Image: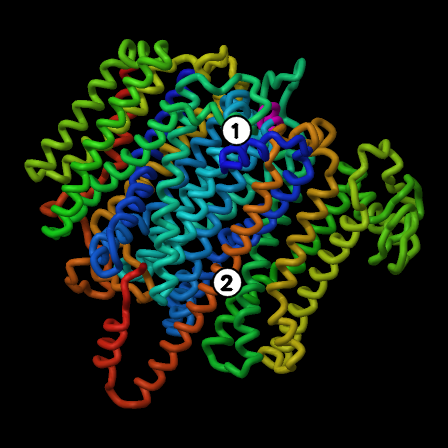
Amino acid sequence: MATLIGAILLASITLYAVLGGADFGGGLWDLLAGTTARGRMPRALIDESITPVWETNHVWLIFDLVIFWTAFPHAFAAVMTALALPLWLALGGIVLRGAGFAFRKEITRLSLQRAAGATFAFSSLLTPFFMGTVIGAIATGRVPADATHASLSAWTSPTSVLIGFLFVSACGYLAAVYLAGEAERRSDRCLQTYFTRRAQAAAVVAGALSLAALVELHGSNRAMFDRLTGRSLSLVILAGVCGLGVLALLATGRRIVARVVAALGVAAVVWGWGVAQYPVLLPGTSVTLTNAGAPNSTLIALVALVVLVAVLVGPSLVLLFTLQGRRLLEAGEGGPWSVNGPTGQTQPPRTPLQPPRPAGKPPGLLALVAVAALVRRRQRR
Amino acid sequence: MTPVQAVTALAASPLSAEVPARAQMATTLGFHIILACLGIALPTIVLIAEFVGLRRSNPVAMKLARRWSQAMGVLVAVGAVTGTVLSFEMGLLWPTLMRQYGEVLGLPFGIEGLFFFLEAIFTAIYLYGWRRLSGWAHWWSGVPIAISGIFGAMSVIAVNSWMNQPGGFTERGGRIVSVNPWQVYFNHAATYEMPHMVLAAYMVTGFVVAGIYAAGILRGRRDRYHYTGFAIGFVPAAILTPFQIFIGDTAARAVAQDQPVKFAAMEYVTQTSRKVPEWLGGVYVNGHIYGGLKIPYMDSLLVGFSPNTEVIGWDSVPAAERPPVVWLIHLCFDVMVGLGFLLLLAGLWAAYTWWRKRRLPSQRLFWLLGAVSGLAAIGAMECGWVVTEVGRQPWVVYRRLTTTDAATTNGGVLTSLSLIIVVYALLAVATILILRMLARRWRRSDLREATVLDGAAARPQEQAATRAGARWPR
């Protein structure tokens, strides 16, 4: 039962990484988009792609936290105590990112809009970086089981910092790949090349950082390295293959397929980490999935809840992503910003929901594919 | 000193974390709860406006619905991030609470997560579907938000009421060995806390919306737009007020039963006795009550409908188990009840005038009352939270875990508290400024519309001008 919950937690983390992570990555590209005039088009695409979905994607984080503290309260308390500082900083990033993003849309004065935008873009880097250091600290066994005090050395080891940067680049990578696909679906050549180039660069950086983290792990934490290259080897290879596959797909212009493969690659990294640790929850301690706190009755209730989430939230998510994929979700009451998409084609202001078009392009059901892949993998195990 | 050293020094400072941790929790919860109320009930208010707009082809109501949903977008975003802060704080400030009881109180939180998901998804569809979804399809896409708002609120309150009346689990040797989710969710206190908070959310939202338009009417904007906006907020809130007072009264009696020490602090019951008087106002310091109006026998009457009802005083527990600052608890309770009755009065006034004259009252005093009703509702709700939270002290889980023991052993909470206060102050100012800016923009567009209607068909140019004036964010 505890293993099942562990798998559910990992699946939920994966979804946060591939969906929420991309939203943070959008902030990275927003930050790097240059001056107001030069960055207008990419920022527009980023804004339109993130707006309807970021809050939903963000809920995965809440869900992760709740599963973590309900199923493994002892490990949760230890992590929250030992890694308090990076968690506070990640939280600061979440608050400023969300507020900056929401405010930017409604502000009309350019200077204030720039300030809100800069807040959004800069804080989008904080959260993945510090989350990365937290995961790095856990994976390298720096969290004691009965932590009573925050520790600076726990999350500032070279491995943790490398993983922090890896998270930032992975978010940027996912975002650029998704945005390149989005630009293709809008047949916007200019942005298509723009984000393809950035996706390729981010892929190279993320790949290099992953390798560097592995090398660093080889020197500093041999046990974890052995498990990653032993038990998790197939997943690590899958992640590498996906990375190379995305590069190939981008080079050949198949950007929409590239999105799925990119998400799969990131999912493989998350699962590689999880499988390598299994069944230990806090490496370096004796805290495992089975002895981290919750009684069986809690775990059963939690599984029932997850089934309910799958039944109720799953179809709703599909609906949301379908509507977004068909570009039926746009800002309401004519705000200050154009809602006509970056290519400038005007749309009828209010047409009824069209029936599904069989000949239309497949909707970007990235989430659905990711979920399906995860479910299939869980069944295999 | 390098920043790293400074951070380490702060983190290692030996200051007790309990007081700043409580202050931080109070600040963040007190801030978030207003947004949470709006998140729970504003969708319903917007849906009412859209319903009126669709059903009666009322363009004013329709315009209000569209505009409110734009404001809702901002409020929901700020509410989502401030809510996340609370989730993190559960672990960052109260690790021992989570370590001991995470497996119990986590379940209602999980159910809340489910509804939070539905809320976020359908909020996105509703907010961004205005242009492309047909009228009733769009309306129905908002219904799940309203429903999941109510259930989400119930789930969070399930946790809070569980902290007041913990149950539904077996503890052996300091470890939880089994949990009964139903008894955790529907604990003793849940039956009255849940409806009390859901109604409070609807009252806060309704009166806040009404207050904004009442203020406009006071400033001379006496048009259909403002009266409609006022009515759509005021009517549901005013209808719910008497029910809220009834539930609050029931809740107080239940608190007298289940959490007698909290009740004793609320009503200044120093000793367990009969014929207990009711104090209205008054400050309790060192055994004396300064000021305040004493009504003999009233408290016993309210608790058991008879002057001979015995009311348990705070002398029933040792001094260490009594809540601090009783005067704060008592005054907050009185303010909450007083504001509740003030809001009831406003509702009755409007109802009487409607009954006799089929219109809203024209007296300036009524509109003044209407204009402050939003602040009054927020004040009452915040006071209620002070009563229930400070009144439970020194316990975080009633009679099981003290707040001191639950608090983090980390130093540096003072730092996070200071930063949070700064960030939240900025957040509050920015949110209010942006909402005001939206309102100004709407007024300008109304003005333009009026001139366009007056001055023949100047429409195309007008639209072109709007488009040219549109600037990309950032």
Coordinates of residue A172 in the picture (x, y in percent): 26, 39
Q: Is residue B97 above or below residue A273?
A: below
Is mark 1 in CB contact (under 8 Å) with mark 2?
Answer: no
Dot label at residue A80: 1
Query: Same chain for the residues at labels 1 and 2, yes or no?
Result: no
Q: Residue furthest left?
A: A252
Coordinates of residue B95 in the picture (x, y in percent): 58, 28
Q: Which of the 4 image quadrants contains residue B405?
A: top right
Decide whether the magenta segment is chiefly helix, strand or loop: helix
Residue tagged by mark 2? B432
Query: What residue is shown at x 39% (from left), y 69% (from top)?
Result: B62
Of A226 and A280, the residue lying toward us: A226
Q: Quadrant of the C terminus of chain A?
A: top left
Is residue B113 found left or right of A217 in the rendered image?
Answer: right
Q: Is residue B98 magenta?
A: yes
Which chain's residue wears label 2?
B
SS class of the residue under badge 2? helix
Query: What residue is shown at x 37% (from left), y 21% (from top)?
Result: A7
The kind of residue tagged 2 is Ile
Coordinates of residue B165 in the picture (x, y in percent): 69, 33
Q: Is residue A272 magenta?
A: no
Which chain's residue wears label 1?
A
